[in-house]
Image (spheres, rainbow, N blue to C red):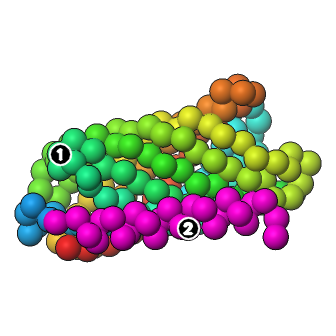
């Protein structure tokens, strides 16, 4: 089995661990979600050239410290002509409840990516910074938009990315 699949397995195990932790946590308020699942589309553009990568993303988010810390564990698959990439991130976010149906978060954390084929095949670790806009038109279903910026401290490679999709909150 390739190294990329080992990383994917580790990220998947992390997501399931996060679900278990979130499910075991006692909710302080009945209106708060124990965890939120995110499913959407994603795009990434390296800032050194114009070729973008596009694909899908899934994440789980939970709140270990109410109003102070949310943790997001995500997995993204990006594809373009010539290569495929599998990446995962672990973001620590500070939430701000703007209105009952709009939440804004700012966060940072490590991002791990594995280019599975093509000329730049290999593994990279980056620092990722994110803004997260969450809209909840109903109590448990909503949508989000998350722009991110990442930099690889070893190579200096930088990229801008986004994801947009659906939210599903669980009590």
Distance from disc 1 to disc 2, alpha carbons, whole Å, reads: 26 Å
* Image: 72 above or below 124: below
Q: Is residue 53 visible?
A: yes
66 horizontally vs 115: left or right: left
Crowd around label 1: few <14 · some 14–19 · many ≥20 (10 Å) = few
Q: Is residue 165 visible?
A: no
Q: Which residue position holds label 1?
A: 67
Residue 83, image x, y percentages: 83, 57
Say which quadrant the C terminus sits in: bottom left
Residue 143, image x, y percentages: 34, 64
* Image: 38 above or below 161: below
For the magenta stretch, what is the residue range? 1-26
- Which mark is first along the chain, 2 or 1? 2
Residue that appears at 66% across and 32% down = 152
Residue that appears at 53% across and 50% down = 89
> In the structure shown, which secondary structural element does the residue marked by tag 2 occupy?
helix
Q: Nearer the viewer, mark 1 or mark 2?
A: 2
Q: Residue furthest right?
A: 119
Q: Residue 94's quadrant in the figure? A: top left
Between 73 and 96, the one lying in front of the other is: 73
Residue that appears at 26% across and 55% down = 63
Residue that appears at 74% across and 53% down = 114
Between 101 and 8, the one lying in front of the other is: 8
Q: Which residue position holds label 2?
A: 12
> In the structure shown, which secondary structural element does the residue marked by tag 1 occupy?
loop
């Amino acid at each position: 089995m390739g190294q990329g699949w080992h990383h994917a397995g580790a990220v998947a195990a992390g997501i399931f661990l996060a679900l278990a932790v979130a499910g075991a946590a006692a909710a302080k308020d009945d209106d708060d979600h124990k965890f939120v699942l995110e499913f959407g589309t994603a795009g990434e553009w390296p800032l050194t050239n114009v070729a973008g990568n596009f694909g899908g993303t899934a994440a789980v988010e939970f709140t270990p410290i109410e109003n102070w810390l949310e943790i997001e564990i995500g997995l993204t698959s990006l594809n373009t002509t010539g290569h495929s990439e599998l990446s995962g991130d672990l973001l620590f976010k500070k939430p701000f409840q703007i209105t009952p149906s709009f939440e804004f978060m700012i966060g940072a954390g490590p991002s791990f990516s594995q280019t599975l084929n093509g000329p730049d095949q290999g593994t990279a670790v980056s620092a990722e910074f994110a803004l997260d806009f969450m809209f909840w038109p109903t109590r448990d279903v909503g949508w989000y938009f998350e722009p991110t910026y990442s930099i690889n401290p070893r190579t200096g490679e930088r990229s801008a990315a986004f994801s947009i999709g659906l939210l599903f909150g669980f009590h």
